[in-house]
Image (spheres, helix red, strand yellow):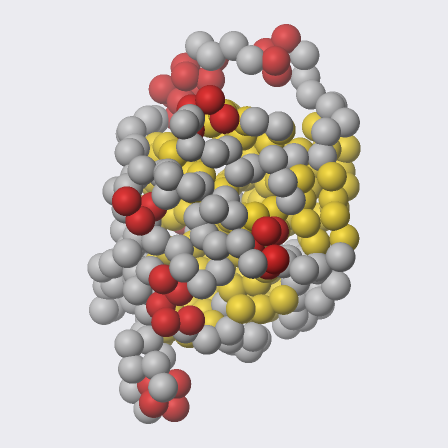
Amino acid sequence: MKFRSFGKLFVASLSLASLAFVVASAPSESATAAPTKKLLWSQEFNGKKRVGIDKRYFTHDLGNGFGWGNNEKQYYTASSSNILTDGKGNLVITAKRIPETSSILNFCDDCQFTSAKVKTADKLGFMYGRLEARMKTPAGSGMWPAFWMLGASLTEGDTWPDCGEIDILEGKGSEPNRVYGTVHGPGYFGGDGSQKGWGFDHTVPLTSGFNVYAIEWRKNAIDFYFNNNKYYSITASQVKPNAWVFNQEFFLILNLATGGNFEPNIDPAVQSGSLTVDYIRYYSVNGVGKLIKH
C-alpha cells in the first residue's frame, strides 16, 4: 500500500479482567454454541534457520515508499538481516538502526532503520472466516508492528481508503501493554481520525511473551479477538451512511515500521527491535470462509 494515514484513535483502557467482563456481558452466537472451525491455510515457520518467506504466498514491499504515506522512518529490504526464520519455529522481522555510513542514506536521508514488510497480494486472498497470528511484539518507543489486511480491489485500480483496511493488530513500542484493532473505509479512516476501532491495555506488556491476535469476519460484520477473548465488533450498520467495503477479498500484510504518524517518537537509544511470529492460520467458521489462490 502506498498511502496509509492514522489520526487519533478512540480507545479505552481495559484490564483483562474488565475485558473478560465485557465479553461475558455481550451475548453472541458463540455463547450458545462453539463455532466449527476448519483450517484452510497456515504458515508455521518450521524448518531450518535463515530461510526466507514462502514465495508461493508472499512477496516483499521494498524501499521507503515516500514514508508509506505516514512519514515512516524505515527502509524495507528482503535481507536475512531483516527477515528470516529462526530455526525455532518462528518468522522474525527485525528493524535495525541504519549506520551513519550506510549508502541507503544517500537516497533516503530521512530513514533511520532497515526492516521488512511482506504481503500476499496477487498470491493469496481471504474472504470471511478467522485469520489469526501468534506473535511477540518489539519493545522500544518508535517500534510499530502490524498484522493487517487491504482490499484486493487496491491491486485492480481502487484507492485507499475505498478499498478497505482491517488492522488485526497494531502496536506501539511506546505503549507496550496496548492492543489496537481498527477498520478504515470511505468516510471513516485514519487521515481524519474517524476510523472505527478499539484499544485496551493488557495486564502485562505484549513484548514479554506471545499472544494470539485474530479476527472473525462474516458478511457485514467483523469481530476482533485477543487471546480468544472478543474485545471489539464492527458492523455495516455502524458505518452508515458510509459504505461497508469489507464484503470482498482481502490480502494479508505483515510488517514492522518505525516512527511515522502513529508512533512518531523514536527513542534514540533503540538500536533494533523484532516482531516474532510463531504462526499465521486461516480457518473457515461454521462453513464460512474462502481461500483464494491466484
In the figure, is residue 23 to the left or right of 56? left
Confirm whether residue 21 shows in the render: yes
Tell me where residue 132 sits by quadrant: top right
At 61% from the left and 16% from the top, the residue drawn is: 30
Task: From this view, report whether residue 28 is shown above or below residue 129.
Answer: above
Q: Is residue 265 above or below residue 115?
A: above
Say above or below: 212 vs 261. above
In this image, 232 relative to 142: left or right? right
- Going 56% across and 48% down the picture, which residue do you hit? 151
Can residue 201 be seen here? The reply is no
Q: Residue at x 36, y 62 (%)?
A: 69
Residue 221 spot, x, y in % from top left:
55, 27
Number of numbered tags placed on the structure image: 0
- Of residues 31 and 89, the one nearer the viewer is 31
99 vs 276: above or below: below
Residue 191 image point, x, y percent = 31, 49
Could you tell whether 95 is left or right of 148 in the image?
A: left
Q: Quadrant of the C terminus?
A: bottom right
Residue 108 location, quadrant: bottom left
Question: Where in the figure is residue 220, as x and y percent of width and height?
Answer: 56, 27
Please tell me which residue is depicted at 68% across the width and 17% down the height of the picture. 34
What x and y, as percent, mark residue 240?
Answer: 42, 26
* Closest to the observer, 7 or 111: 7
Q: Which of these two is toward me, 37 or 196?
A: 196
Q: Nearer the viewer, residue 82 or 106?
A: 106
